[in-house]
Image (cartoon, rainbow, N blue to C red):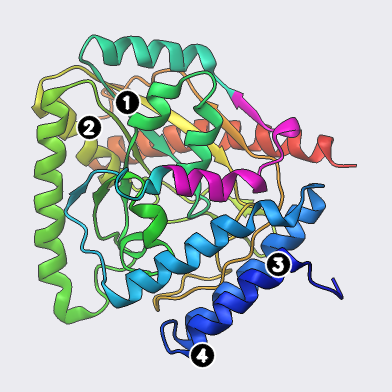
Amino acid sequence: MDKKSTSEQIFLDELNTLHDSGLIPSKYYKILLQFYEGFIQAVHQAGKRPETIVPVFLRFAELLRKQLQEPYEFEPYHRKIRSPIDYYQFSLDFVRPLINFSQSNVFGLDVLDEIEEEMKQGRNAVFLANHQTEADPQAIAIMLQKTHPHLAESIIYVAGERVVTDPLAIPFSMGCDLLCVYSKRYIDHPPELKMEKQLHNKNTMELMSKLLQEGGKAIYVAPSGGRDRRNAKGLVEVAPFDPQSIEMFYLMAKKAKTPTSFYPLSLSTYDLLPPPETVQKELGEARLAKYSPIHLFFAPKYDMESFQDEKDKTERRQKRADDIWSIVNQNYLHCVHLSKKAQP
């Protein structure tokens, strides 16, 4: 784009003012500027008017400024903030323009019906899912709003350190129900905080146990501990599932004594906000937005008693994790195939 519209320039002027006054450091100014330019291109590709997203970007810049000046501290169990700022609605309004709804799908609506009915009866549902973008919670909520609005707002996400420490991610995280943990990828960084992080995780798990005991909960967890990334051939692969992570959730559910069912969930959301090509330990990763279809595939309830004939405990857990991963991967590949067919 050679010439900026008046509305586009309004945001750029505001961002420049925040940067020049020192309210937004150069690092985040550059990331947000690049993000905005890509977002505008995505909106143009979608055939939408850029001025429709300027207000939400202005709000984003203001929330970033606020976060940098007064960092928000997340509790181990964070409840979405709806007032005085409705962070939940803000995050949905932000992500929605990137989704090509005409080519997007939600598979397994009958499974969602079953889950909602079980939740009404005080039972729990745990989604064992892959994870592709920072915006996965928003993508799930947006795609479920029409058919299962209660579930869309009810899911509790097990969230890693980065989404509650990166200033650019925090405004979106504040609009989610989160159980905050440190993933295996980052628990040793820096080494002197390892014990503190392990204690935090223990406290979070105790809170989750109480939630499961209460019943009527839906919890999303990514047993891979991170986002999917491209392989050497440039293809996005579903990251392997950690058997210990799955076992921990399974044992916690059994200990709670409230009936809990486990459901494999496949997400195809990668192109909305692709992650960095490699794992980045420092905060402040670049954001590149794209206009893209997305797909969710909710598989039927998984029998967690599978492979009980396997006497070796380690082998049993590994086989179960591999089996669940296989279901998630197979359904993910189905979604990828649909996306390729829909491309012009």
Identify the mark nearer the N-term, 1 or 4.
Answer: 4
Start-end of magenta stretch: 89-106
SS majority, magenta: helix
Badge 2 crowding class, 10 Å Cα cut-off, few under 14, some 14 to 19, many 20 or more, is some
Name the residue carrying label 3: 8
| Type of amino acid at the residue the image marks with label 4 | Asp
Q: What percent of the width, then of the height, locates residue 321? A: 37, 38
Mark whose residue sits in front, 4 or 2: 4
Instruction: State the SS at label 2.
Output: helix
Q: Mark 2 points at which residue?
A: 250
Q: Provide the residue designation for mark 4.
A: 20
Categorize mark 1 by other alpha carbons within 10 Å: few (<14), some (14-19), many (20+): some
C-alpha span from label 4 to label 2 = 51 Å
Q: Are marks 1 and 4 in contact (CB under 8 Å)?
A: no
At numbered mark 3, what does the secondary structure look like: helix, strand or loop? helix
Q: In this view, does 49 lie to the left or right of 200?
A: right
Q: Name the quadrant of the N terminus.
A: bottom right
Q: Is residue 96 above or below residue 328?
A: below
Compare marks 4 and 2 and give the one earlier in the sequence. 4
For the residue marked with disc 2, what is the amino acid? Tyr
Instruction: Inspect the magenta stretch and tell me whether residue 265 lies in it.
Output: no
User: For mark 1, what is the residue?
Assistant: 307
